[in-house]
């Protein structure tokens, strides 16, 4: 899939291009779990790409693959991750360490689990600066830590406090500060608003939008919250069972979705203009990644599936500039 992110052609080359990426989890004595298969997308400077789907659809695996931070059982079996004219999959681990945090960084899901509970916040941010930049002077590092905390709305004086002394929203802001420590071009945000209350969620989203405006960040935003996607994203990649279901600009996804899975997800999203309408749900469960159906992975749950859907997996169809759909129903 050579998708174009927005409905308008971009002249500049994408910052990040992922082509036909496939990832398996392999455990001894068990069948491989095909967590990601043949996924492609592009991410441009200053763009926010939403990566959505139910739990277990491969979102976090895809995000970790971009930084080559998969667990030991995870293996990238094919594809390309092109950044700065280089395929990251061809780099040695030493070369890859120069890309992590400095060029591509990540806001991990669950700040309390990602932060070290026995080290001050400032030390943890400073460690990223010391390891991945040329700054080694302690005073310079402390100044940079203070600047980063101030950037995300935390008083620099609180750099010597521990994670348990921060509120949930502040811990998430600290994670964002750490992700920005080395001035990366791309930030991967893996469900950064999970487990936060509505007001704090809104503050974190506004902070990300501000950083995009001020720093020109490109953000891959991993979430299952369609409301968040509608609010902040420019384009959307919908995943199901480890594969691409639909990929288009955000307006297309919300106003003219073509894949049944995308349509069903939107039906399950609350409509504030019709508060008394009952929410829909998708019957059944996502497929086990080590026991995938032979045809379309969504077919067992799809309200419009027909014989062909159960017999062969659909290819990805191009429906126009930037709109890609993996469904036989769009095959004219």
Image (tube, helix red, strand yellow):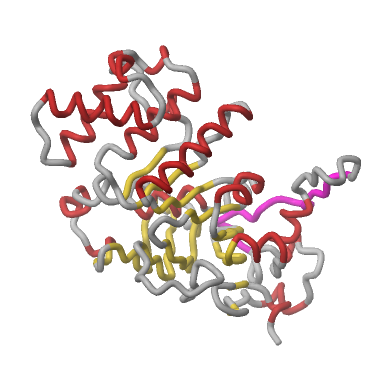
* Residue occupying the point 55% across, 53% down: 233
Q: Is residue 72 left or right of residue 243?
A: left
Would you say residue 31 is visible in this rendering? no
**Residue 99: x and y, percent?**
24, 51
* Residue occupying the point 45% across, 42% down: 210
Q: Is residue 157 left or right of residue 32?
A: left
Answer with the quarter of the image where residue 128 lies.
Answer: top left
Q: Which residues are magenta?
A: 278-292
* Outermost residue toward the right in this view: 276
Instruction: Decide whether residue 291 is among the magenta residues.
Output: yes
Most foreground residue, 109 or 123: 123
Q: Is residue 105 left or right of residue 222?
A: left
**Residue 121: x and y, percent?**
31, 21
Answer with the quarter of the image where residue 18 lies.
Answer: bottom left
**Count of residue discs:** 0
**Residue 163: x and y, percent?**
38, 18
Would you say residue 4 is visible in this rendering? yes
Instruction: Decide whether residue 86 is among the magenta residues.
Output: no
* Vertical arrangement, residue 80 with respect to residue 172, above or below: below
Which quarter shows the C terminus? bottom right
* Residue occupying the point 61% across, 27% down: 199
* Residue occupying the point 72% across, 79% down: 308
* Outermost residue toward the bottom in this view: 332
Most foreground residue, 266 or 232: 232
* Outermost residue toward the front in this view: 214
Dominant secondary structure of the magenta stretch?
A: loop
**Residue 274: x and y, percent?**
87, 45
* Vertical arrangement, residue 18 with respect to residue 132, above or below: below
Most foreground residue, 59 or 222: 222
């Amino acid at each position: 899939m050579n998708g174009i992110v927005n409905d308008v052609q971009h002249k500049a080359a994408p910052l990040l291009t992922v082509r036909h990426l496939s990832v398996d989890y392999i455990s001894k004595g068990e069948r491989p779990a095909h967590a990601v298969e043949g996924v492609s997308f592009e991410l441009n400077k200053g763009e926010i790409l939403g990566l959505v789907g139910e739990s277990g659809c491969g979102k976090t695996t895809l995000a970790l693959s971009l930084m080559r931070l998969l667990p030991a059982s995870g293996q990238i079996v094919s594809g390309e991750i092109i950044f700065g004219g280089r395929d990251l999959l061809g780099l040695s681990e030493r070369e890859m360490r120069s890309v992590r945090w400095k060029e591509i960084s990540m806001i991990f899901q669950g700040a309390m689990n990602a932060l070290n509970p026995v080290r001050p916040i400032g030390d943890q941010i400073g460690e990223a600066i010391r390891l991945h930049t040329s700054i080694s002077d302690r005073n310079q590092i402390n100044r940079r830590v203070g600047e980063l905390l101030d950037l995300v709305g935390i008083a620099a004086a609180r750099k010597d406090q521990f994670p348990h002394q921060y509120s949930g929203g502040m811990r998430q802001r600290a994670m964002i500060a750490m992700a920005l420590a080395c001035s990366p071009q791309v930030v991967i945000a893996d469900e950064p608003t999970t487990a936060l209350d509505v007001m704090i969620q809104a503050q974190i989203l506004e902070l990300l939008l501000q950083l995009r405006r001020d720093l020109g960040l490109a953000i891959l935003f991993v979430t299952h919250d369609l409301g968040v996607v509608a609010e902040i994203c420019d384009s959307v990649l919908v995943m199901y069972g480890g594969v691409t279901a639909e990929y288009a600009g955000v307006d297309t996804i919300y106003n003219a979705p073509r894949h049944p899975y995308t349509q069903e997800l939107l039906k399950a999203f609350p409509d504030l203009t019709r508060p008394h309408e009952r929410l829909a749900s998708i019957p059944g469960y996502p497929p086990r990644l080590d026991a995938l159906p032979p045809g379309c992975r969504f077919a067992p749950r799809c309200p419009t599936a027909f014989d062909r859907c159960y017999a062969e997996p659909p290819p990805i169809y191009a429906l126009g500039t930037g709109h890609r759909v993996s469904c036989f129903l769009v095959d004219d």
